[in-house]
Image (tube, rainbow, N blue to C red):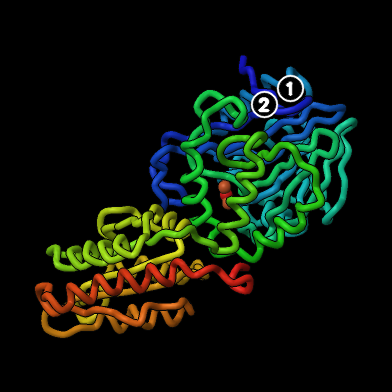
Amino acid sequence: MFKNQLIANDIFYVGVNDRQKHKFENMIPLTNGVSYNAYLIMDQKTALVDTVDISFGDLFIDKIQSQLQGRTLDYLIINHMEPDHSGSLRIIRQYYPEIIIVGNAKTLSMVEGFYGLVENVKEIKDGEILSLGSHKLEFFLTPMVHWPETMMTYDQGEKVLFTGDAFGCFGTLDGAVLDTDMNVNRYWDEMVRYYANIVGKYGAAVQKALKKLTPIDFETICSTHGPVWRENISEVVDLYDQLSRYKGAEGVVIVYGSMYGYTELMAETVAQGLAEAGIKDIIIHNVSKTDSSYILQDIFKYKGLIVGSPTYSNELYPEVESLLRKIEIRGVKNRVFGYFGSFTWAGAANQRLKTFGETMKWPTAEISVEEKQGLKTENYQALLELGHQVAELVKLPYLESQHCG
Ligand code: FEO
């Protein structure tokens, strides 16, 4: 019944869209949904590349059977074991008991660990080739993008690279699958948000993978999330290169927590200082209102970060503290930093923010402001100056040594 989209000769899209789940990994809002992409190669032997979230297992089987037309499934190639892709592994094995599960040593260990499957598995090594007939599949191990077993599969004849999560993004596929058949503008920010939240810590591993891919002449990228990339390949690879180098554009994100508006007023004043100094991309986020996945997205996009927080129970405002931990965990590099705070009877916020900047090893504005109660003229001027100083730091060129993750 299903007419699966053709990606290249004998290669069909058999993925699904998820518009039901509210939060990816139970944490990250799926505002625009997400697709779980899987691909079926119809050759002398048939091969499925990755599976989908088990919530869509029935639909997935229907799509596969529509294509196979009674043929069997010979191989299941697993590029990534996270359950949004491996979740339908057991149901596939139930329908096709003879299927050979193909993966590297770490993959197969997880196949056993997650699903208890040890029979009919084939371990492949880096650079090994599996022939399906006319299609020759070459495997590239790309560990820690963003799990230890992650790998990519290259169809040499069709020049199609199956990349797992790499080059993926949030957002469902609404009709078309190939980027040549759609307006892709809505996916760019979702690619940054995906990268910042899911892959963000592993910039060095992504750089290593990108170098490994350099000699490969691929013309199509089949990721496990979002569009199949063909006419935007250079943009997609460039974006991944920039993100994994932690190289931000000339702009500043101001994140603040504020209970009664006093710290918010400080944030607006700093923004005015940035604008006076010529910064055109200034994004202000109220940490209590904007989900942190979007704040992290913008932090990965722009070079400057300024954080403001009230003192709360002699600590940082808890929502700000939570965000700082998320930044620390990702080891975000190459940012320039500024901070300000407020308090009513005893200040502690600025000291924590200062320590945060030192921990991250980011160049930090010399001036910082910690206001007691309402904003006074002297501190108003100092906040403008904080904006000026961060603007100057943002405008300094990146040094080559700063680039790599
Ligand atoms: Fe889309 Fe790392 O799973």
Q: Amino acid at mark 1?
A: Leu
For the residue with label 1, is its CB less than 8 Å from the closest atom of ligand 1?
Answer: no
**Relative side of 89 to 266, left or right:** right
In the rendered image, the residue lying farthest to the top is 1
Residue 38 seen by the camera: no
Q: Is residue 209 above or below residue 163?
A: below
Q: Secondary structure at mark 1?
A: helix
**Relative side of 8 to 3, left or right:** right
Residue 169 seen by the camera: yes
Front residue of this view, candidates 56 and 389: 389
Q: Secondary structure at mark 2?
A: helix
Front residue of this view, candidates 331 and 298: 298
- Find out whether the residues at labels 1 and 2 contact each other: C-beta distance under 8 Å: yes
**Residue 262 quadrant:** bottom left
Residue visible at 44% across and 54% down in the picture = 297
List x then y, in percent, for residue 313: 19, 78
Task: Give the number of marks.
Answer: 2
Q: Amino acid at mark 2?
A: Ile
List x then y, in percent, for residue 144: 65, 61
List x then y, in percent, for residue 312: 20, 75
Q: Is residue 358 above or below residue 12?
A: below
Q: Quadrant of the C terminus?
A: bottom right
Residue visible at 49% across and 70% down in the picture = 396
Which numbered disc covers residue 64? 2
Residue visible at 53% across and 60% down in the picture = 200
Residue visible at 67% across and 38% down in the picture = 222
Tell me how far mark 1 sits from mark 2, CA to CA. 6 Å
**Residue 44 quadrant:** top right
* Residue identifier under label 1: 68
Q: Badge 1 local density, few (<14 within 10 Å), some, or many (20+)?
A: some
Front residue of this view, candidates 333 and 259: 333
List x then y, in percent, for residue 244: 59, 60
